[in-house]
Image: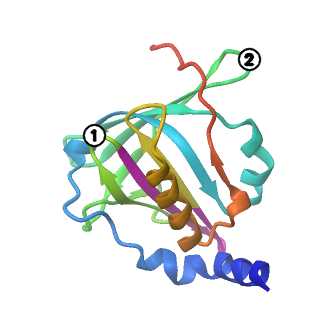
Amino acid sequence: MRNTLMMLVALMCPLTVCADITPAADFDLQKMSGKWYTVALANNAQWFVNKKAGMKTGTAVIVLTEGGDMDLTYANLKDDGSCFRANPTAQKTETPGRFTFHSQDKVMTIVEVVYDDYALMLTSKTKEEKSEASIVVYSRTPEFSEVVQQKFTQLALEAGVLPDNTVILPQIAECPAV
């Protein structure tokens, strides 16, 4: 019964709960700028379940653009020693702490942030009537506290991500600077 209930929550999230999750109060992108470590992930998509065992800690550098958007630079060291890098820009919306990517089908919300410690982000994506919720924990250091882990787990459940679809990322070396 509990598993059935959890699956029902996971299916309903994009229609109800995710839309109701509000950004952090008094969000300040300037304070969010700088280097972060990606220390935990959760996602309700099948591709994530298949790939999560090989995922590891990476870095994200956030830079405020002149127009108020958020430039993100991701770097993850791969098993072969090469680096995966990506540099998307999240466009600001009228709601501080909420951003969109590409077209309006992908929305990122900074749910909670302590600027010198951690940030919890929820990204929801809807395409061709398929919805996906993703939660990321960013930390200013490669480690994060048990309290933040509990907040991450709770947010994942609220977003409809099943407990088996969460991962605390193991630490590895960082990609070299370019």
Label located before the other in sequence (2 or 1): 2
Image quadrant containing the C terminus:
top left
- Highlighted range, magenta: 118-133
The answer to which image quadrant residue 127 occupies is bottom right
Between 92 and 30, the residue placed more toward the observer is 30
Q: Can you say whether 99 is above or below 22 in the image? A: above
Secondary structure found at label 2: loop
User: Residue at left 41%, top 32%?
Assistant: 141
Between 63 and 11, the residue placed more toward the observer is 11
Provide the major secondary structure of the magenta segment.
Answer: strand
The single residue placed furthest to the front in the displayed view is: 146
Label 2, label 1: how far apart the Cα atoms are: 32 Å
Q: 42 left or right of 152?
A: right
Q: Residue 27 appears at what percent x and percent y? A: 23, 57
Task: Count every numbered label the image shows and give the total.
Answer: 2
Q: Which residue is mark 1?
A: 116
